[in-house]
Amino acid sequence: MTFRQQLRAIKGVAKISFRAAPGAVMFKLVGAVVGAALPFVTTYFAALTTTALAEAYGGDADAGDRVIVYVLITAGLGFFMTIWQSIDQYIQAMMRYEVESKVSDRMYEHFMNLDFWRYDDKNTADLYDRSRNFTQFFAYIFDRLAGMVTTFLTMIGGVAALVVVNWWLALFLLVAIIPGVVIQFKLSKAQIRHWNQNVETRRAKNMIEWNMLEPAKIAELRLYGIVRRLLTMRQELRTKDEKTRIEFERRFLGIRLVADGLEVAAEVGSLIWITLQIIAREQPVGQFLYVQQVVSRALRGAGSFVSEISSIDRDVANLFDYQSFMELEESTGGDRRLQAVPKELKVAGVSFSYPQHDELVLDNVSMTIRQNQHIAIVGENGAGKSTLVKLITGMYKPTSGQILIDGLPLQEYNVTDWHRQIAVLQQDFIRFGFATVRDNVMFGDISRQDDDVFRQALVQAEASDFTSKLPKGVDSYVDTWMEDSDGVNGVELSGGQWQRLALARNFYRDAPIIILDEPTSAIDALAESRIFEHLFAEKDKTIITISHRLTTVEKADFIYVMQNGKIAEQGKHAELVEAKGVYYKLFKAQIRK
């Protein structure tokens, strides 16, 4: 970052902070000035006290009274500073809460409203990681900015305070301070470049740590004997990131020692000069304390200023990433409102390739799904079935062709309206481990709390039996790491039980269009058959099913067979079996003789 960019970034941090907590920001700014000025005022009166003591010792009868006055003033200043620091700690805590809450809430809400394709985009992921790092430490960044203002004023104030004694002494101190500040600027820039170039390194390390500390994955890691390998990889990644960053310090060590030596020379030279001045009776005795304290505070202020720059430069730089992230366009869809259940969903000549990839995942796919029709989409893994679902739900836009709702492009409709019409259960459904059984089901439609529909959803999903046997029934937590207010631990569900719970969530949603992508892969065949009997018994639902089980597929009104991103065959079960084509080969082992 250039100096101008740093100033812009600092201005941005201040603006965001002021919008979140204006009173606290004003207090911090006043506190920065008070924190810088008060020590010098205290030093001034301490020096006067020392001079008055020397005069009293020398026989000045009035000097004793002046000593008492100066001591009381110095003590009062110290008491005021103590009170100010106590108030400042409270203001800091409150400000961190206010600012961090508003900034992080704004970012998370924005993240959840991006175009869906961005969740698969590496550049967006890198930008998000850097932005999230900024929001996590934003409240502390402003604290450090206030600290930087204080230390800068302390440094400049020290130089200015020496002008009162001798202007060239102040100039000598200023010259001694500058090299250390310049060196730290260069070091910070090198470290920031390294930080931004190693986003993937830190991400990989964090993913390894997450996998190693997740109880559900420990068994497989140990059985496969890869724990030591992962530990080694973690160490290599940490070395590439953290150790390399530390080594920048070694490169600047020699020149930094020279700068430190120059600062020591300035301090020693100033003390020798004032000592000689006092001996020659050209300066009062108290000036030794004054010069010693002023020079010391100025040098410490410079050191702290440099330290603040080192710690804040990277975080301030991330402000640009945060601003860039917040400027990403949100996915809102069109302005057309969807007032009723669609009578027809049409995939018209749709081709699709994922962003930054040229290979077509879907190639000129067309199908028509009418209201209350039960459709099955089948094909080998990688045929494009799940990708087609992503386009139908509006997660992605076709590369060519259109998804039509009652004859109009899906992109013209308000995306929220469209999502209210559908319930989707995919293979990688969400497991809300922090919630109860009841919550996991009712998350299907948070706009209502209907116990009758809830119980019916459990029955339809074949989940009422096992949930009733849990320690607290449907109010039991579904993760062993959770504990309720009565001290009852949560339970661990099997894969099949989780799938039934996810199915119940979709039944509870009671949407007119249901999309099921391998929804029962962990459920036994008999239970699956009963579940789909419940499902297909609902004649007022449009159902789109992706499955590899013939018992599910053959119940559909119409079947589309996909191969290599294209529609290879279509028709009813009996017709496709008789044709002995792709469909027949796909289900040959399951077809009854």
Image (spheres, grey):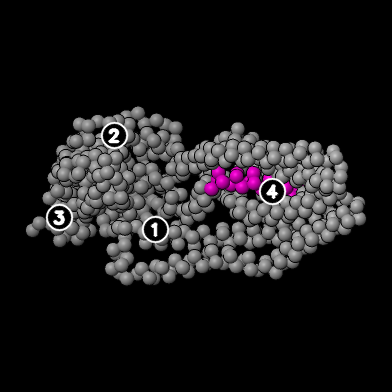
Front position among marks 4 and 2: 4
Q: Kindly report which numbered mark, 3 or 1, lies closer to the viewer in this rendering.
A: 1
Residue 253 lies in what quarter of the image? Answer: bottom right
> What is the count of numbered marks?
4
**Closer to the N terminus: mark 3 or mark 2?**
2
Three-letter amino acid code of the residue under disc 2? Lys
Q: Name the residue at 70% across, 51% down.
A: 301
Per the rendered image, the range of residues in magenta is 137-157
The residue labelled by disc 4 is: 151
Q: Amino acid at mark 1?
A: Trp
Spatial CA distance of label 2 from label 1 is 46 Å
Q: Earlier in the sequence, mark 3 or mark 4?
A: 4
For the N terminus, which image quadrant? bottom right
Q: Position of residue 5 (x, y in %)?
A: 67, 49
Of 438 and 82, the residue lying toward us: 82
What predominant SS class does the magenta segment belong to? helix
Reading the image, the residue beneath label 3 is 578
- What amino acid type should be assigned to the residue bearing mark 4? Thr
Find disc 2 in the rendering and name its residue: 343
Task: Answer with left or right where residue 387 lies relative to residue 86.
Answer: left
Badge 4 element:
helix
Residue 58 x, y percent position in the rendering: 86, 47
Instruction: Point out the residue furthest to the left here.
Output: 593
Quadrant holding the C terminus: bottom left
Say which of 356 and 307 sits in front: 307
Q: Dot 3, how many residues are within 10 Å of its Cα: few (below 14), some (14-19), or many (20+)?
A: few
User: Could you give the CA–CA distance between mark 4 and mark 2, rounded to whole angstroms?
Assistant: 69 Å
- Mark 1 or mark 4, whichever is nearer to me: 4
Relative to 230, say whether 478 is above or below: above
